[in-house]
Amino acid sequence: MSIVKSIMKQLGLSGDPAKNFTFSVPPSPDGTMKLARGNAGATTQDIMTVDAAGKVAFPATPTPTGGVGPAFLAKTNAVQTLNGTVWTVLNFQVEMFDTDNCFASNKFTPNVAGYYLFSGSAALQASALSASKVIKNGTESYQGSFDNANYIGSTTVLLYMNGTTDYVEFMFYAAVAATTNGVASPAFFSGFLARSA
């Protein structure tokens, strides 16, 4: 069993104090301890503390990995006629929100690199085989549900976007010529930064 013989012990010998850590107990031991960033006697940030009851706390605020970046939600307010057996980019007339002005002309082109969660759904006015997909950069396709009975298609996918040129669109398919149910049950397309690059 190892016994801590000093009240403060520096871990690391880097010339940059931010790369060193210090383990310490109070001058009058009371059952508590602390791990902090920095050199012994000159720490700059508490990383972990343990109280006398053994409760561990992490006072340092972690850097967010997502939640700060582009997000959008668009929906239809008009019907759209689809030619049978052809994938069609849906037209979204209403932007519910577009935090960074990255959604335009039915395309979302985020200006921050990272991993984005996209979701879209649409329905036809009459029963027909239907499907939906999110398409990246016009060619890379991620197909969601394929429905032969309920004329609804939905897709959810997590994609990496480079923050400059990558873009996505939402497409819908009907096995026969059909019209989307764009007003009573509007189609929607949404996305947000789930994790930064």
Image (cartoon, rainbow, N blue to C red):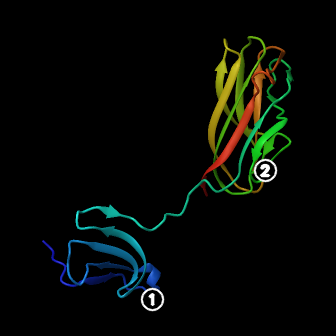
Q: Residues within 10 Å of mark 1 (few under 14, many from 20)?
A: few
- Give the residue at mark 2: 102
Q: Quadrant of the N terminus?
A: bottom left
| Disc 1/disc 2 C-alpha distance (Å) | 44 Å
The relative height of residue 84 versus residue 90 in the rendered view (above or below) is: above
Q: Where is residue 138 drawn, in percent x and y? A: 79, 40
Residues 74 and 172: in front is 74
Q: Which mark is residue 15?
A: 1
Q: Residue at x 70, y 57 (%)?
A: 112
Amino acid type at image mark 1: Gly
User: In terms of sequence position, does the residue under pointer 1 or pointer 2 come before the other?
Assistant: 1
Tag in front: 1 or 2: 2
Residues 108 and 28: in front is 28
Residue 105: which quarter of the image?
Answer: top right
Q: Quadrant of the C terminus?
A: bottom right
Does 32 sit left or right of 162 as displayed? Answer: left
Residue 137: which quarter of the image?
Answer: top right
Residues at circles 1 and 2 in contact by the CB criterion of under 8 Å: no
